[in-house]
Image (spheres, grey):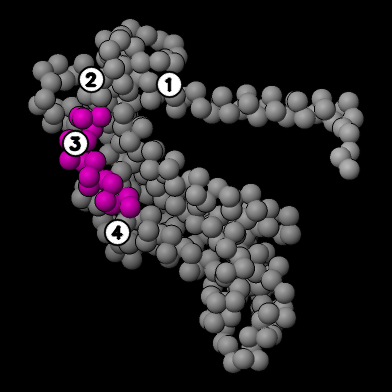
């Protein structure tokens, strides 16, 4: 039997739909504006100050041709993909192991260890001590400088710990009777049951590493060949470098396309992560709720 909604519930549902539609429009319009501007006529784009909701003038993909011939794009993409895969691997293993350790009731010092980690999350040393540690470890201008400082996060450990605590103890006890050690219990029994939370940790890590540029700026001052994609995009968007446009000999009025190149750079740098997000989105709500409500 279907329960009839009250007048208040109907109003509440309509308000929720309207609010979500408005929120979606607010989020989509900036991306749509950038996408339409990147394929518009450069002269008309320079003369327009408002939102661009459709391509201005004749449809043009010249800006994307310039971006795709920019040598920094391939270097940036390859480095960023490497950093994302390596960071997800390192962070995933450490987060699972950290969450497993502090979730064990038999581990005597788990409360002290958890309190110690939370203290570092609330009161960290800051940028200068972190830079001095990386420098004294001789990691400057190496790929490890992009991976080690952000290898583990207390927030991720808390998410994994809460998810692991939700697994019934009887499963571990059954595995122990069959002779399983901690690694077998952790990776073959518990981790498959916590895949939603693990997917959220991977999503946070991948997006954060894909958009990261500040660590590269301070830890890779001279190694241009190790810079991630966002640093090359920063050169185009903030410093107004004309390298990408100047490298393209296909057009005579190259500087005219500088604005369009910036718009195209935004699309090119964000499109891959936008394509990946829908595949892990289904785990997002469940994983975050497990890590927050039961904490």
* 10 Å crowding of disc 4: few (<14), some (14-19), many (20+): some
x%, y% of residue 91?
47, 63
**Residue for badge 1:** 33
> Which numbered circle lies on residue 70?
3
- Reply yes or no: does residue 67 show up in magenta: yes
**Gap between marks 2 and 1 measured at Cα:** 17 Å
Q: Position of residue 176 (x, y in %)?
A: 64, 88
Asked whether the residues under the numbered discs 1 and 3 touch, taking CB atoms below 8 Å apart as contact, a structural biologist would say: no
Classify residue 263 by image quadrant.
Answer: top left
Answer left or right for 138 relative to 291: left
Dot 4 or dot 3: first in sequence order is 3
Instruction: Compute the Cα span from label 3 to label 2.
Output: 14 Å
To which quarter of the image does residue 69 belong? Answer: top left
Q: Is residue 199 above or below residue 273?
A: below
State the CA–CA distance, disc 1 to disc 4. Answer: 35 Å
Q: Can you tell which of label 2 and label 1 is closer to the viewer?
A: 1
Q: Residues within 10 Å of mark 2 (few under 14, many from 20)?
A: many
What residue appears at the point 31 percent right and 28 percent down from the top-left corner? 264
The mark total stands at 4
Secondary structure under the numbered disc 4 in the rendered image: loop
- Establish if 99 lies above or below 244: below
Which range is magenta?
Answer: 64-81
Which of pointers 3 and 2 lies earlier in the amino acid sequence?
3
Residue 56 appearing in the image? yes
Contact (Cβ within 8 Å) of mark 1 with mark 4: no
């Amino acid at each position: 039997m279907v329960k009839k909604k009250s007048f208040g519930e109907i109003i509440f549902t309509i308000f929720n739909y309207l609010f979500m539609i408005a929120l979606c429009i607010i989020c989509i319009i900036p991306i749509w504006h950038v996408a339409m501007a990147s394929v518009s006529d450069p002269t008309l784009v320079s003369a327009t100050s408002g939102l661009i909701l459709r391509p201005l003038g004749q449809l043009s993909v010249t800006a994307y041709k310039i971006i795709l011939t920019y040598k920094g794009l391939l270097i940036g993409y390859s480095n960023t993909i490497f950093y994302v895969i390596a960071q997800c691997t390192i962070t995933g293993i450490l987060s699972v192991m950290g969450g497993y350790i502090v979730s064990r009731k038999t581990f005597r010092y788990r409360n002290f260890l958890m309190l110690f980690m939370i203290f570092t999350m609330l009161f960290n040393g800051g940028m200068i001590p972190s830079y001095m540690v990386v420098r004294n470890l001789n990691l400057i201008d190496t790929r490890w400088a992009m991976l080690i400082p952000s290898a583990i996060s207390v927030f991720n450990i808390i998410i994994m710990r809460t998810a692991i605590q939700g697994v019934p103890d009887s499963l571990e006890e059954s595995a122990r009777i069959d002779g399983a050690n901690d690694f077998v219990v952790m990776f073959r029994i518990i981790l498959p049951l916590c895949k939603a939370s693990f997917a959220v940790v991977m999503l946070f890590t991948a997006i954060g590493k894909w958009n990261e540029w500040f660590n590269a700026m301070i830890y890779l001052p001279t190694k241009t060949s190790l810079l991630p994609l966002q640093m090359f995009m920063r050169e185009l968007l903030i410093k107004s470098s004309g390298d990408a446009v100047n490298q393209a000999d296909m057009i005579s009025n190259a500087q005219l396309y500088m604005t369009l190149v910036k718009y195209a750079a935004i699309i090119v740098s964000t499109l891959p992560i936008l394509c990946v997000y829908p595949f892990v989105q289904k785990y997002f709500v469940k994983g975050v709720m497990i890590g927050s409500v039961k904490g």
